[in-house]
Image (tube, grey):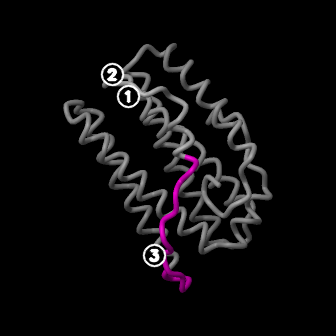
Amino acid sequence: MLGLKFETKTSWVTIAKNDLQQILTDHAFAEQKAASNAVSIIINYSEETELVSAMSEIAIEEMEHFKMVHDLMIARNMVLGRDQVNDYAKHLKNYFPKTKDRTEALIQRLLLAALIEARSCERFKVFSENLKDPELVQFYKDLMISEANHYTTFLGFARQYQDKEIVNKKWEGLLKYEADFMKKRGTQAKVHG
């Protein structure tokens, strides 16, 4: 369904569950960054009414997820750590050439967001299927569904703003680029690490 070209190894789950505070901190900030991205799209493409409505819903939902992760941490006597550089998103942004074309820039942003959501969905699935903690299993299953919905929303909008075949070619190239990067990952307690 997600079209990802590389599957997360279960060894990442061991790393993540052995440093639960780190993975939860990283996850919380990933949700906050996703909300910020949706707000930024609203600001930069405010004339696109349908897009603005969808991004408003995503921004609210992502901040709700941030609060859910933070509340879970508090319930487990954890403190939200400091945000760290997200080298995953930074690396993905290097795939596309810089452009001054507003529509092209929007397509790139939507595809990047779709891929980040797709990878988060896949990671949450792997995490939930390999945990023994019933609360975390359910927590990540629920979030997995939301990430999948966000992924399809972003990808769907990209296909509305440009010819579907062109978007699909860009998407396939981005998927391959991300897969090559992910082959070297899975060693840190980070959602995309």
Q: Amino acid at mark 2?
A: Asp
Above/below status of 72 relative to 44:
below
Q: Is residue 170 magenta?
A: no
* Callout in the foreground (3, 1): 1
Whether tag 2 and tag 1 are in contact, CB under 8 A, the answer is yes
**Residue assigned mark 3:** 71
Q: Earlier in the sequence, mark 2 or mark 3?
A: 3
Residue lying furthest bottom: 77
Mark 2 vs mark 1, CA separation in Å = 6 Å
**Residue for point 53% across, 35% down:** 94
Find residue 191 and report its horizontal and vertical position in percent.
60, 57
* Callout in the foreground (2, 3): 2
Mark 3 vs mark 1, CA separation in Å = 35 Å
Mark 2 vs mark 3, CA separation in Å = 41 Å
Q: Mark 3: which secondary structure?
A: helix
Crowd tier of the residue under label 3, counting other residues whose Cα lies within 10 Å: few below 14, some 14–19, many 20 or above: some
Q: Quadrant of the C terminus?
A: bottom right
**Residue assigned mark 1:** 105
**Residue for point 70% across, 54% down:** 126
Q: Is residue 140 left or right of residue 12?
A: left
Q: Which residues are magenta?
A: 74-88
Badge number at residue 101: 2
Q: Amino acid at mark 3?
A: Asp
Crowd tier of the residue under label 2, counting other residues whose Cα lies within 10 Å: few below 14, some 14–19, many 20 or above: few
Question: Which of the 4 quarters of the picture holds residue 31?
Answer: bottom left
Of residues 119 and 140, which is closer to you in this image? Answer: 119
Find residue 75 and report its horizontal and vertical position in percent.
51, 82
Q: Amino acid at mark 1?
A: Ala
